[in-house]
Amino acid sequence: MIEVVLLAIALAMDAFAVSIGLGAKSQKQSQQYVRHLAIYAALYFGIAQGVMPFIGYLLGAALLGWLAAAAPLDRRYHLNCAGWQDAVRSAQW
């Protein structure tokens, strides 16, 4: 659960930084322009930050089978590398 809270804080800081930039840009604009800009920025960030984790979930679910099939190969590679490291260490003594 802490990961979700940290992700939410990071996304909020990102949106806050963009909002500061947009606010600084539109100081000399009319109130109507600023209101429309604020609404569009909120919609774009809300949609993007809501859709991106969903897309990541779908990609993760789609790649799960491929990653599960590749995991034994990765384990053998790491064990082989560890074996070579042990052999080199023992030869140095």
Image: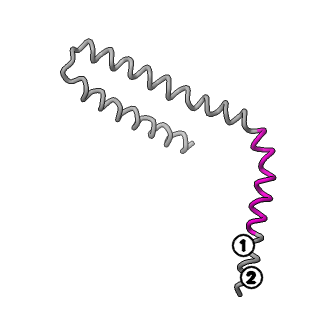
Q: What residue type is labelled 1?
A: Gln
- Count of marks, rendered view: 2
Q: Where is residue 5 in the image (x, y as percent from the top left)?
A: 50, 40
The residue under label 1 is 85
Q: Where is residue 88 in the image (x, y as percent from the top left)?
A: 73, 78
- Depth check: give the residue in front, 77 or 49: 77
Few, some or many C-alpha atoms within 10 Å of disc 1 (few <14, some 14-19, many ≥20)?
few
Checking the image for residue 90, the label placed there is 2
Q: Label 2, secondary structure: give it.
A: helix
Residue drawn at x 33%, y 20% is 38
56 on left or right of 7 = right
Residue drawn at x 50%, y 26% is 48
Q: Could you tell me how far apart the alpha carbons at marks 2 and 1 are, in whole angstroms?
A: 9 Å
Q: What residue type is labelled 2?
A: Ser
Going from N to C along the chain, the mark reached first, 2 or 1, is 1
Q: What stretch is highlighted in magenta?
A: 65-82
89 on left or right of 31 = right
